[in-house]
Image (tube, rainbow, N blue to C red):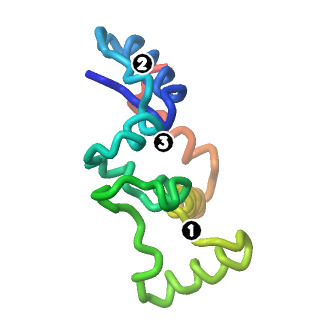
Amino acid sequence: MIDYGGSGVSAGVDLLGLELAGITGAKLYEGSWSDWSRQDLPVSNLPGGEPEYLDPHKDEAPVGWWVTGYTWYAIDTPAHKRFLSAYQARFNGYPRLGSVVGYATVKTAAAAIARARSTIAVIAGARIGLVM
């Protein structure tokens, strides 16, 4: 297994996690995306194709990089329009995939708390089956 990150720094945490999980022998591609993208090599990393990863490259983004992720500009529902409008008013930009994941997580937690009528019940329920 070879791990990588944007510049090789964050992948170190992944390697530690793999070791702690008992998965040994993983290697680090030190150059990571910063190095790979300068070599005009093909890229087919689905999460790496999210627009928020490509934006910093601007005109230097590798040709042929598959774009994936959250198509905020193409979703035409009233709920999404409200979310998009509020997001752009607050942050003066388009929402990234992480924004949607965070929003959905908070909304899910709020619904679970409301349904359980108690934050303690939700926390207790989340711990069922976890080994601490």
Instruction: Look at the numbered discs 2 and 3 and tell me whether their residues touch, using CB distance below 8 Å.
Output: no
At label 3, the amino acid type is Gly
Dot placed on the residue nearer the N-terminal end, 3 or 1:
1
At label 1, the amino acid type is Pro
At label 2, the amino acid type is Leu
**Residue at left offset 30%, top offset 51%:** 46
**Residue at left offset 40%, top offset 43%:** 37
State how far apart marks 2 and 3 are (Cα): 30 Å
- The vertical placement of 18 against 120, above or below, is above
Neighbour tally class for label 1: few under 14, some 14-19, many 20 plus, Cα within 10 Å: some
* Residue that carries the numbered disc 1 in the rendered image: 95
The image quadrant that residue 15 belongs to is top left
Dot placed on the residue nearer the N-terminal end, 2 or 3:
2
**Residue at left offset 41%, top offset 12%:** 20
State how far apart marks 3 and 1 are (Cα): 31 Å
* SS for callout 1: loop
- The vertical placement of 25 against 67, above or below, is above
* Residue that carries the numbered disc 2 in the rendered image: 15
Dot placed on the residue nearer the N-terminal end, 1 or 2:
2
* Residue that carries the numbered disc 3 in the rendered image: 125
Residue 70 x %, y %: 42, 67
State how far apart marks 1 and 2 are (Cα): 30 Å
Residue 109 x %, y %: 56, 56
In terms of depth relative to the viewer, which is nearer, 127 or 39?
39
- Residue 46 lies left or right of residue 31; in this view the side is left
Neighbour tally class for label 3: few under 14, some 14-19, many 20 plus, Cα within 10 Å: few
**Residue at left offset 38%, top offset 12%:** 19
